[in-house]
Image (cartoon, rainbow, N blue to C red):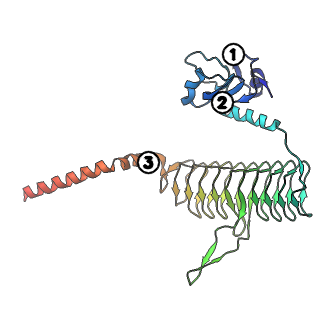
């Protein structure tokens, strides 16, 4: 599907600088721009590529001031990255969507599947499962008894939804993700072995949640593990039993959240963050990569990093000291030796 610069500018509310009639039919990175494609520039460190890019149209922020001539048609918008996302969503919505139920799927008689849903081959749908309108369940998914899937939900190949779990509207679960596996609950015994504690709760994903590939959300021991609306979870993330993740929080890959921890709204967890259990994390908290969090965070809107988590500027100062420790050690040894020499002279 082709779009002109004028059509794109009208859609985004942008301003054209160049040829309004130029057409594009695909996207490209700015450093690999080709004729007939649309690219974008939002990060200043990529500015050098705009002067040699062959992309026909480039989205830029209104504040961008070129240092020399740009051959591409520019569309100036408030936020180039957000505008790109808006355009890509529009294109994605125009793609044909599969509907219908494959005869190779196993569907229990008591299951309810709404109109325009798609169920691929080799899907298992258990008893009393409900699947909403326009939802897609791709090959080799398993939805167990009593689970409820909302409208406009996409479960990619190999997703497993355990019994009684609830998935809201407009959610996306990528391949290999598991919703409702048992929480890690074991009671130690006198002989040193462990007795399993049955996990009797469920998982609730509210609306507009996205779960990355091979990420796990464990069911609650009692009650619910809750992922609030708008949460975005990357690949390879572990969410333990009875955790609550606040609205519009984002969690990057290889992060682990221990049981019964409660995250506030609009938090950001970078890669490989680890949170201990039974913590309370304030709204707007940002944890840098590889941060370890052993204690609750009560003050909102902080940026923390390191182990244990400390304010990020303190972490950067500590890192500088840590880098210089070998030289500081030599200095301390030299001072110690000099002090000993002076003490001998005095005595």
Q: Quarter holding the C terminus?
A: bottom left
Residue at (78, 25) in percent of width and height? 3
Closest to the observer: 297 or 63?
Answer: 63
Q: Of marks 2 and 3, which one's residue comes earlier in the chain?
A: 2
Q: Is mark 2 on a helix, strand or loop?
A: helix
Q: Pointer 2 and pointer 3: residues touching (CB < 8 Å)? A: no
Q: What element carries label 1?
A: loop
Residue at (88, 50) in percent of width and height? 117
Viewer-nearest of discs 2 and 3: 2
Using a 10 Å C-alpha cutoff, classify the residue at mark 2 as few (fewer than 14 neighbours), some (14 to 19) or many (20 or more).
many
Residue to which mark 2 is pinned: 80
Q: Is mark 3 on a helix, strand or loop?
A: helix
- The tally of labels here is 3
Left/right of residue 66 with respect to residue 93 in the rendered view: left
Q: Quarter holding the N terminus?
A: top right
Residue to which mark 1 is pinned: 18
Q: Label 2 vs label 1: CA separation?
A: 17 Å
Left/right of residue 276 with respect to residue 72 in the rendered view: left
């Amino acid at each position: 599907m082709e779009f002109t610069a004028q059509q794109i500018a009208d859609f985004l509310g942008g301003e054209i600088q160049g040829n309004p009639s130029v057409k594009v039919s695909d996207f490209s990175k700015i450093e690999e721009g080709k004729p007939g494609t649309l690219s974008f520039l939002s990060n200043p460190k990529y500015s050098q590529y705009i002067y040699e890019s062959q992309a026909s149209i480039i989205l830029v922020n209104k504040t961008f001031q070129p240092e020399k001539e740009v051959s591409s048609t520019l569309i100036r918008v408030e936020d180039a990255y957000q505008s790109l996302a808006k355009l890509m969503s529009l294109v994605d919505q125009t793609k044909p969507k599969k509907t219908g139920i494959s005869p190779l799927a196993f569907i229990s008689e008591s299951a309810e599947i709404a109109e325009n849903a798609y169920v691929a081959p080799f899907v298992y749908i258990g008893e009393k499962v409900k699947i909403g309108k326009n939802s897609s369940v791709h090959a080799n998914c398993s939805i167990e008894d009593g689970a409820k899937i909302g409208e406009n939900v996409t479960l990619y190949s190999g997703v497993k939804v355990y019994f009684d779990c609830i998935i809201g509207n407009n959610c996306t679960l990528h391949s290999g993700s598991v919703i409702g596996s048992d929480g890690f609950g074991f009671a130690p015994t006198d002989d040193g072995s462990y007795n399993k504690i049955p996990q009797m709760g469920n998982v609730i994903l509210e609306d507009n949640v996205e779960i990355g590939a091979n990420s796990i959300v464990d069911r609650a021991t009692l009650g619910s593990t809750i992922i609030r609306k708008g949460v975005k979870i990357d690949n390879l993330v572990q969410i333990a039993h009875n955790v609550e993740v606040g609205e519009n929080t984002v969690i990057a890959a290889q992060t682990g959240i221990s049981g019964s921890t409660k995250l506030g709204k609009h938090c950001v967890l970078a890669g490989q963050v680890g949170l201990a259990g039974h913590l309370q994390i304030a709204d707007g908290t940002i944890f840098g990569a590889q941060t370890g969090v052993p204690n609750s965070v009560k003050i909102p809107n902080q940026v923390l990093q390191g182990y244990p988590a400390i304010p990020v500027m303190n972490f950067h100062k500590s890192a500088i000291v840590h880098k210089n420790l070998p030289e500081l050690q030599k200095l301390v040894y030299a001072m110690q030796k000099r002090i000993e020499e002076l003490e001998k002279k005095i005595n």
